[in-house]
Image: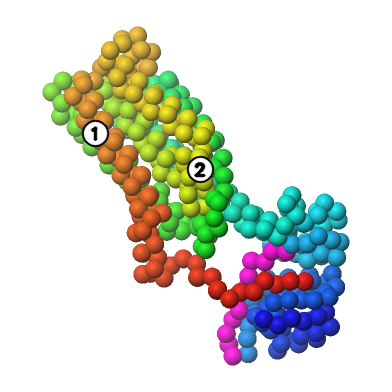
Amino acid sequence: GLAIDSNTFKFLNKNLVYRHLLVRNVSVFARMRPFDKQEAIINMMKTVQLSDGRTINSQVVGMIGDGANDCAALSVAHFGIALSEAEASLIAPFTAKSLSIMAAVDLVKEGRACLANAFASFKFTIFYSLAEVTAMFLSYFYGADLSQLEYTVLDFLFFFPVVFFMVKSKKADKLRSSPPTFKIFGPTTIWSLLVPLIILFTINGLALKLLTVQSWFKPHPIGTVAFYQIAETSTLFLVNCFFLGAASIAWSFGSKYRQPIYKNTPLLACYCLELLITLLVFLLPNRNIPFRNFMEMVYLPDDFLLVIAFLGVTGFFSIILFEYLFILGPVAKYCRGKSGRGRPKPVKDIGLVEF
């Protein structure tokens, strides 16, 4: 790339024919005045139309400065990082404690981890809401509802602590060449949420269907007073215990833009608590009548509990494997390569722009 001084920059910047050179060909801007630095940043943030009809797309531009003469450029860049605690730190959104330009890399990694955490909590919240609403409306269909304690277990043990610690995942050690998705309605987000929901609806329907063919099953008369202790509500509650755990694990894998899941100790503690609770609500109601009455559940034979466990485990691993293989793993990479979707690959010979 070229190196130019302030006078050359002003000449090229006044001529639209040559302005694109400032974006494509210049790597070093020397002896630049404060407002010239600002103009250089603005040029890089604009879309430039070339004389031959080609277009240079606008760029995401960051600025690192350590003095008062950098304040103008720091204020207009997409993100500004101050390398001092003097005047520049008052203008720049971020101040580097390390006083090193590597702070830009750390900031990008932190931003990507924050975006990945936000999308994970968004998907888990949507999934949890639809899972609980599905269980509620299916229960209404049978003239019943989940008990207040079952709702409390799902809300305060399977959702709130998990979503709280899910967003505490720290940034990854390495900076990936491609960023995470930022589209709420993009194909990655939609498929990551839609397929687990389809699995959830399918397992719920299958569990209720298998319940109705049991020889001991007596349907609750529809149209009577709402009742908590029926087999349908207990079945739906047990199935949801599996699926909420599966969804939270699938969307907390990390290792790409965030630290791996096993490095989030509080989140692992939540998963251990979920496992313990699932075992308790599966095994204890049949063996402890006071606990069963306290949870407002009903007696389900052990052979049917095994059927629910099989369906729950199948759905559990289906959701996790789908996220790991199809959304994060090799299948997603292959499909993006074939379809041409995703961000363009970074140019290898980009130089560092210096002022």
Expressed as whole percent of the image width and height from the top left, the position of residue 272 reads 42, 29
Residue 108 occupies quadrant: bottom right
Quadrant of the image for the N terminus? bottom right
Residue 313 shows up from this direction? yes
Closest to the observer, 30 or 240: 30
Magenta region, mostly helix, strand or loop? Answer: loop
Q: Residue furthest left?
A: 215
Q: In the rendered structure, does residue 57 fall within the stretch colored magenta? A: yes
Dot 2, crowdedness within 10 Å: few (<14), some or many (≥20)? many
Residue 221 shows up from this direction? no
The residue range painted magenta reads 52-63
Closest to the observer, 337 or 15: 337
Secondary element under disc 1, as helix, strand or loop, is helix
Closest to the observer, 207 or 146: 207
Expressed as whole percent of the image width and height from the top left, the position of residue 242 reads 34, 33
Q: Earlier in the sequence, mark 2 or mark 1?
A: 2
Q: Residue 121 has which mark? A: 2
Residue 331 occupies quadrant: bottom left
Q: Is residue 263 above or below residue 276?
A: below
Distance of mark 2 from mark 1, alpha carbons? Answer: 27 Å
Quadrant of the image for the C terminus? bottom right
